[in-house]
Image (cartoon, rainbow, N blue to C red):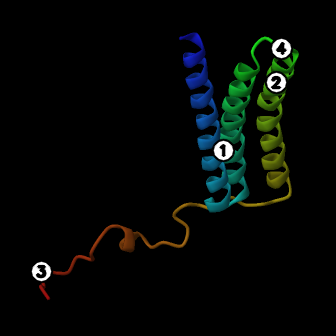
């Protein structure tokens, strides 16, 4: 019974790790500028690695490798956000401007069809 629960918990943790890593990958590819990319890479990639490493540590059980895995998990939780902050700060200091989501759109285009002075077409 306990081994079945442990197996499914490992599977869920690894599945969540793969999911968040996939979301991070898609975010890095799709997002427009370095600031948004650093944001998604630091948050979702940290979660993805965290869940995957937690699943690996649970799979190892009470072995020395599990201790190393937990230490690696701690290291990832500290370094990923720190690295993303350093990248974003470096970009800001070198003058990289963030892209705005509504840049290049006209307010009239986003509000729907243009109103006329009572004329119907």
Q: Is residue 92 left or right of residue 10?
A: right
Q: Which residue is mark 2?
A: 69
Q: Is residue 88 left or right of residue 109?
A: right
Mark 2 or 4, nearer chain start: 4
Q: CA distance from mark 2 to mark 3?
A: 70 Å
Nearest to viewer (mark 1 / mark 2): 2
Residue 115, given in percent of the width and then of the height, sits at: 22, 76
Q: Which residue is mark 3?
A: 118
Q: Which residue is mark 1?
A: 21
Q: CA distance from mark 1 to mark 3?
A: 53 Å
Nearest to viewer (mark 1 / mark 3): 1
**Residue name at image x 73 percent, y 27 percent:** 56
**Residue name at image x 70 percent, y 30 percent:** 50
Q: Is residue 101 left or right of residue 10?
A: left
Are the residues tagged 3 and 4 within 8 Å (C-beta)? no
Are the residues tagged 1 and 4 within 8 Å (C-beta)? no
Nearest to viewer (mark 1 / mark 4): 4
Quadrant of residue 106 in the image?
Answer: bottom left
Mark 1 or 2, nearer chain start: 1
35 shown above or below 115? above
Are the residues tagged 1 and 3 within 8 Å (C-beta)? no
Q: Which residue is mark 4?
A: 63
Residue 49, given in percent of the width and then of the height, sits at: 72, 35
């Amino acid at each position: 019974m306990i081994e079945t629960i442990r197996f499914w918990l490992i599977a869920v943790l690894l599945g969540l790790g793969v999911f968040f890593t996939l979301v991070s990958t898609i975010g890095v590819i799709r997002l427009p500028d370095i600031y948004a990319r650093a944001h998604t890479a630091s948050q979702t990639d940290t979660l993805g690695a965290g869940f995957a490493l937690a699943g690996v540590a649970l799979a190892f059980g009470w072995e020395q490798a599990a201790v190393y895995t937990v230490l690696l998990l701690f290291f990832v939780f500290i370094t990923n956000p720190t690295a993303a902050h350093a990248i974003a700060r470096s970009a800001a200091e070198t003058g990289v401007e963030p892209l705005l989501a509504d840049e290049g759109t006209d307010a009239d285009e986003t509000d729907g069809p243009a109103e006329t002075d009572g004329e119907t077409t």
